[in-house]
Image (spheres, grey):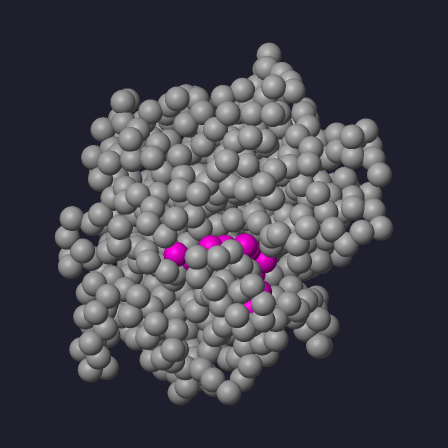
Amino acid sequence: MTQAVLSVDPPCLWKPSNPDNTEMERFRKHVNSKFNLSLEDYQALWRWSTSSVSDFWSTVWDYTNVISSTRATQVLDTSVPMDQVPEWFKGARLNFAENLLWCRDPERIAIKATGEGQSSVRNISYAELYDQVRLCATAMKQAGVGVGDRVAAYIPNCPEAVIAMLAATSLGAIWSSTSPDFGTTGVLDRFAQIKPKLLISVNGVVYNGKRLDHLAKVKPVVQGLKDSVTTVVMIPFVKDMPTELEGSVAWDDFLNVKDAPKDIEFAQLPFNHPAFILFSSGTTGLPKCIVHSGSGLLLQIKKEHIIHGDMKSDDVFFYYTTTGWMMWNWLVLGLAVGCTIVLWDGSPFKPAPISLWKLVDDLGITHFGTSAKYLQALQDAKVHPKDECKLDTLKAIYSTASPLKPESFEFCYEHIKSDMVLGSITGGTDICSLFGCHNTALPVYRGEIQCLGLGMKIEAWKDSNTPVFAESGDLVCTVPFPCMPVYMYGDDEARSKYKNAYFSMYDHVWYHGDYVWLNPRTGGVVMLGRSDGTLNPSGVRFGSAEIYNVVDRFEDIEDTLCVGQKLKDQDDERVVLFCKMKQGKELDEDLIKTIKTKIRAELSPRHVPAFVLPIADIPYTINGKKVEVAVKKIISGQKVTPTGTLANPESLELYYDIPALVQ
């Protein structure tokens, strides 16, 4: 991160024109009235929300209109340590799907679905969605799916995915999905661990201008799951491609049920009842199976959409995501607000780089979500959406998956829209929601996430119990929150996997694995990278994002990867910067010298890499995250087996036996 970004006084790029007219301000005033308080601003509200935990979450429950058949007798037993995963809303009974299907208006659109290769938009009303879920839930029940059973989907971002997820969770079953860009091995690494009873998939997909047969990938998955899967449902997602798979049933036939009840029988379940299994990246081993309660996600994400994001029932919410990324869950929970969600499947750059922005005008999108990498790609390609689109309806852009570079903040305001909230947000699969949030009542500062989320007591720690401001540290959360995973699937009785993942670094405190910098003046957050990828030469610790934000401004460099190499027989490491050059460009000695000089001037002598080396490719996960830890292990002498999570697993071979790094 450059010195300008790490300043406590970064440039302000946007301010709300009428903060008093935001849901956040209405919520603050509601809290003041309800509890006879005088909280004057967001920071005061945040402090109250993280100290009066039970009062806060109970208030969010009522304020966002969570539907339940039975109220809780206790919100939280605060005597239970955080690492023991305390029970939330004891005694409450509710259903996740019911809270997303409260609107049954035949005139209100629930889903608009389109994508690459699709010439039209498929509109599904809330009444139609309810009816499709009713039929699908009946079919699942008749297929033997019940409370606690797993329903798995190897599926694109389509309405059937939403329908099946809601059907499964209405029964109390557990939903898990991966996207078609995962290879067979990656899918089996995930689904074989959770032993699903029912599997749903498609005949084909369209991506980057190509029609891709999916049956060839589904067949070995079905074979690999034959000991648990009793029903396979196939969706004819791509027309004029074969759909038949031996032993499977077609989607329409599956929904053609007899004796379906008039209304959905929503199973009334405890708050902590599991509803979703998401997976860790698994770049260096089998993915962890992270089990989330539907109610925890419901309460947390309604807070994020309604209170933080000012989302209303007449809004249109789009997020460019696949079903294998947690942002799919975040998107679908827009239904809990009663708004319209937009599903897109395919390349974001087809048929043209401007395609997704034309959707804003065509569909009236108000909230547009994407990744930092996508925004960077637009910037690099000099694609300026405001020059080709009106974007009149656009209120907010959300960006996540990796830190949004300071220059990308300016790009969005200069070349997309000047009057909107740019919500750089951060969280993770582990919580399937956010730690660092957007906020329509606060300014946007260059390079910063706007605020810490309400109820999330986030601190930056350098040492145990030593929170710091305006210094880099580990992101920790020191009080329980309702969207903590309920358990790891397949864990032992001692919860060893769970505790090793989140509570092995500090006693009774959630360690998230991110490296952050908190601004005491703005209340903003700067993400510096993953803690396990943090660079630590001679005991000076800093994040890789600091290097990227300097080097990625060089015109001749296409991409970079910065990792530490452990020094042989020493408790130290050296920094190595790999540069993928643009076609026809060369990493010569003059450029290397310029890079080092720039890093030294903008950061410090400690940040200067020991080596700046050319590389033909940079490894990424399917979800668009740089793979730093695996490369760090390779150049430090370890053997790494690529997994199905990698988008370009062959790239790891480039990092073995590099002459300059041999020790």
Taking the image as shown, residue 488 lies to the left or right of residue 295, namely right
Residue 166 in sight from this viewpoint: no
Give percent across and percent down for residue 514. Answer: 55, 55
Q: Please give the name of the residue rendered at 23% of the width and 28% of the height, measured from the top-left corner.
A: 390
Classify 86 as above or below 106.
Answer: below
Q: Please give the name of the residue rendered at 33% of the width and 68% of the height, measured from the top-left corner.
A: 46
Report the span colored magenta: 510-519
Quadrant the C terminus occupies: top right
The part of the image, by quadrant, that contains residue 509 is bottom right
Give percent across and percent down for residue 386. Answer: 27, 27
The part of the image, by quadrant, that contains residue 596 is top right
In this figure, what is the number of numbered marks? 0
Give percent across and percent down for residue 181. Answer: 60, 37
**Residue 368 lies within the magenta run:** no
Residue 457 in sight from this viewpoint: yes
For this rendering, which residue is in front, 440 or 274? Answer: 440
Q: Please give the name of the residue rendered at 30% of the width and 43% of the height, measured from the top-left corner.
A: 11
Give percent across and percent down for residue 52. Answer: 36, 79
Classify 352 as above or below 31.
Answer: above
Taking the image as shown, residue 370 lies to the left or right of residue 290, namely left
Classify 599 as above or below 23.
Answer: above
**Residue 517 lies within the magenta run:** yes
Q: Please give the name of the residue rendered at 44% of the width and 51% of the height, measured from the top-left corner.
A: 526
For this rendering, which residue is in front, 176 or 22? Answer: 22
Prevalent SS, magenta region: strand
